[in-house]
């Protein structure tokens, strides 16, 4: 007899916004003879509305963070070191937006963000998010698995890493005028990590187009790693044989390493990681190994005991 073990983040479908709510919204629009484009909603927003939730990626240990808290407490150093970055990030123009895919691929190319989205089947996933600063949230991301983008890029045999970079435009992002930061923001994962089912490219949140402060129009979500690995506003993806020197690693490698996996037993040099503060509630809860995703990702690191996996 086949016994199917539920993932540890599983919860009943009723715990998140029902799919029928999104679909009813679309039916109402159609009943009035209005297309989404006629309402001034772009392709990504249209896709975010009514996208089916993937029931394999839900949450069993905490409620979703209220949108008002998740949307008003953000790190985006390109614009400010303050958490209230939303007004400043409004200067970012996420359309039109082109993404360069290069390096060790069959053929380098550029693609418009909406053309890329059109080639990917979008879904909604509920993920925990854990910042290295010891705060946390749980949110519904809309997007597609990173592995689909990897397959679309057709990496060459020598490719071992996927390197992602944020836009660089000092006229839009005043934080990029601060010369002591190694702009543009650069992050990377191994090809094996990129192909893990949890690695997710994000185009929306809370059933809406991804707002600027969350990294519009395209960001990464790696729920088993600290949040700084989930690079925002991506405009270049490079496949490389060499491990990249990432943004925070280049800035302060004694505190921030390449791997950045969540581990409650390994403190940051300046604070404990044993607990996390949940946005919107103020509750302090125990931090989970790999942020609760150990069964899905621990095997990625079984032969890397000599690496500093937790910084």
Image (spheres, rainbow, N blue to C red):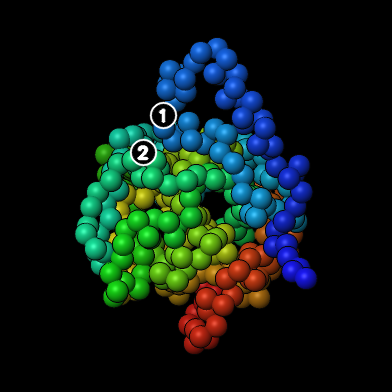
In what element is the residue under mark 1?
Answer: loop
Return the residue nearer the eye: 144 or 80: 144
Percent across and percent down for residue 19 are 65, 36
Q: CA distance from mark 1 to mark 2?
A: 9 Å
The reply to whether the C-beta atoms of the residues labelled 1 and 2 are less than 8 Å apart is: yes
Residue name at image x 40 percent, y 69 percent: 191
**Location of residue 119 (image quadrant):** top left
Considering only vertical position in the picture, is 164 above or below 13? below
- In the figure, residue 53 lies in which quadrant? top right
Give the labeled residue for mark 2.
114
Answer whether residue 136 is visible to the viewer in this image.
Answer: no
Seen in the image, is 20 located left or right of residue 215? right
First of labels 1, 2 by sequence position: 1
Q: Position of residue 32 (x, y in %)?
A: 55, 12
Q: Residue at x 52, y 76 (%)?
A: 300
What is the secondary structure assignment of the residue under circle 2? Answer: helix
- Residue for point 53% across, 62% down: 197
Residue furthest front in the image:
1
266, 208: nearer the viewer:
208
Give residue 270's position: percent from left, percent from top.
57, 69
Q: Which residue is mark 1?
A: 42
Q: Looking at the rendering, in which quadrant would you find the N terminus? A: bottom right
Q: Residues within 10 Å of mark 2 (few under 14, many from 20)?
A: some
Crowd band around label 1 with a 10 angstrom C-alpha radius: few (<14), some (14–19), many (20+): some
């Amino acid at each position: 007899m086949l016994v199917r073990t539920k993932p540890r983040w599983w919860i009943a479908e009723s715990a998140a916004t029902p799919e029928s709510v999104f679909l009813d919204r679309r039916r109402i629009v159609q009943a009035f003879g209005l297309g989404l484009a006629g309402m001034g909603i772009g392709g990504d927003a249209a896709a975010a509305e009514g996208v089916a939730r993937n029931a394999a990626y839900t949450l069993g240990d905490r409620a979703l963070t209220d949108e008002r808290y998740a949307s008003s407490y953000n790190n985006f150093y390109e614009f400010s070191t303050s958490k209230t970055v939303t007004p400043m990030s409004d200067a970012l123009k996420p359309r039109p937006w082109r993404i360069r895919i290069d390096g060790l691929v069959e053929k380098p190319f550029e693609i418009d963000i909406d053309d890329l989205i059109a080639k990917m089947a979008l879904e909604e996933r509920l993920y925990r998010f854990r910042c290295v600063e010891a705060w946390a949230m749980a949110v519904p991301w809309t997007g597609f698995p990173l592995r689909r983008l990897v397959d679309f890029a057709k990496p060459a045999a020598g490719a071992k890493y996927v390197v992602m970079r944020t836009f660089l435009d000092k006229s839009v992002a005043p934080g990029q005028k601060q010369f002591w930061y190694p702009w543009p923001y650069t992050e990377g994962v191994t090809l094996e990590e990129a192909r893990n089912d949890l690695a997710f490219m994000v185009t929306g949140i809370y059933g809406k187009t991804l707002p600027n402060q969350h990294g519009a129009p395209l960001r990464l979500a790696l729920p088993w790693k600290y949040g700084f690995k989930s690079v925002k506003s991506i405009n270049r993806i490079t496949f490389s044989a060499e491990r990249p020197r990432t943004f925070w690693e280049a800035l302060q490698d004694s505190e921030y390493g390449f791997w950045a996996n969540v581990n409650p037993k390994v403190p940051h040099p300046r604070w404990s990681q044993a607990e996390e503060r949940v946005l919107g509630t103020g509750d302090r809860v125990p931090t989970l190994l790999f942020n609760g995703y150990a069964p899905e990702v621990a095997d990625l690191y079984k032969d890397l005991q000599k690496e500093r996996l937790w910084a």
